[in-house]
Image (cartoon, rainbow, N blue to C red):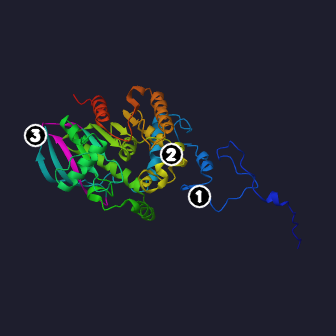
Amino acid sequence: MKRRAFTTLPAAALLPAATPPGTGAGTPPPADAVESPGVVHGNLPAFYERLRADLTYPDAWGHSPIRDFGAWRRHARALVERHLVHPADDRLPFRPRVLDERKTGRGYVRRLVAFDLTRYSRVRAALLTPDRPGPHPAVLLLHDHGARFDIGKEKLVEPWYDEARLASAREWTARLMSGRFAGDELAARGYAVLAVDTLGWGDRGGLVYDQQQALASNLYELGGSPAGLAAREDVRAAAFLASLPQVDRRRVGVIGFSMGGFRAWQVAALSDHVAAAVSACWLTTVADMMVVGNNTLRGQSAFWMLHPGLTRHLDIPDVATIAAPKPLMAFGGELDTLFTPAGVAAAHARLRAVWSAQHAGDRLVTRIYPGKGHVFDADMQEDSFAWLDRALDRTR
């Protein structure tokens, strides 16, 4: 029996070659460098810039080898769907029931309704409908985060059914929305309006700010995620609204502010029931979000807008482009401290490039409001409502 011959190699030959700079993996550290004990700073690893540089978004429109836009949209949507983790409930009956009904004297009726939002949750929702024959154009309203959990849907629809929440909601709208309830304003204009609580807010509350990370980790352990659950629920809420006899299913829009703004372009991308969307004060890029000092780096609220692993495929605005060529209005405030001006500008530019490529540039509005911060005030609301009137042909 022959002995095997072994060749002795230099120690360096036993190590893999370093990735050359400029190949998408970021600049490698010097060969003689080692990490210090204090490798985490400001909730970021010291090598976060190299991680960030490694994100090349290979499935984005223009990067993907798929050249037919319709085929790309189907591919990209399926990709996002896989990252939502929670199963879809597309065929689940809604089983709606009216719990309370009141006329307003402003041309619309208020209803508190219950329906099966998912296979896991039966929820209460605020439904406002014009008191004249339909079918009517409709708007799904998506509330913000704001670290304010006692109210959810009540941030956008005046809670006639709860005095304690009414006081809280009035304080909230006075601070961020010029004292107006957007849902009631829209209903008075002739829209059917639906607002539902996200898990953790309003009727589905009980959440405390510091509990969010624990809730997120527990949902991950159970095979889901906060953002994935919220996305599935928003798609279901849009389908429920479109199913109502008072609603013209071809004219369903969505409006959201802050976290709701993120959810607005997301549900427009994921739901065929949504015909147009308004996103207020939530759009940026990953590169401009993952910077020292950004609010997202604290965790907590970030979990509601985080689909684990998705950024290996698509940047944030790339997900929004799945909605093209639907009408989309996306805007922010010049003084909004939650998003860098460069990040908002880059995200808007990405949207414009895709809508223009689909010969739908006239269906997209991007805007920065001078002198305004992280708000959805009367000026922004009026511009949004007028734009939505045109996008959904309200006067038809």
Q: Where is residue 391 drawn, in percent x and y? A: 31, 30
**Secondary structure at numbered mark 3:** loop
Q: Is residue 15 left or right of residue 380?
A: right
Confirm or deny contact between disc 1 and disc 2 (CB under 8 A): no
What residue is drawn where x is 40% and y is 30%? Answer: 364
**Label 2 belongs to which residue?**
289
Residue 389 at x, y = what percent? 27, 30
Q: Mark 1 points at which residue?
A: 40
Q: Nearer the viewer, residue 218 or 375?
A: 375
Q: Which amino acid does label 2 sit on?
A: Met
- 138 or 381, which lies in front? 381
Dot 1: few (<14), some (14–19), or many (≥20) neighbours within 10 Å? Answer: few
Residue at 46 percent across and 50 percent down: it is 295
**In this picture, residue 87 sits left or right of residue 188:** right
Q: Tell me whether circle 3 and circle 1 mark residues in contact (CB < 8 Å).
A: no
- Magenta includes 212? no
Could you tell me if residue 73 is visible in this image? yes
Residue 195 drawn at (x, y percent): 26, 47
Q: In this image, 392 relative to 308: left or right?
A: left
Residue 148 got which mark? none
Q: Earlier in the sequence, mark 3 or mark 1?
A: 1
* Distance between mark 2 and mark 3 Cα atoms: 45 Å
Residue type, mark 3 in image = Gly
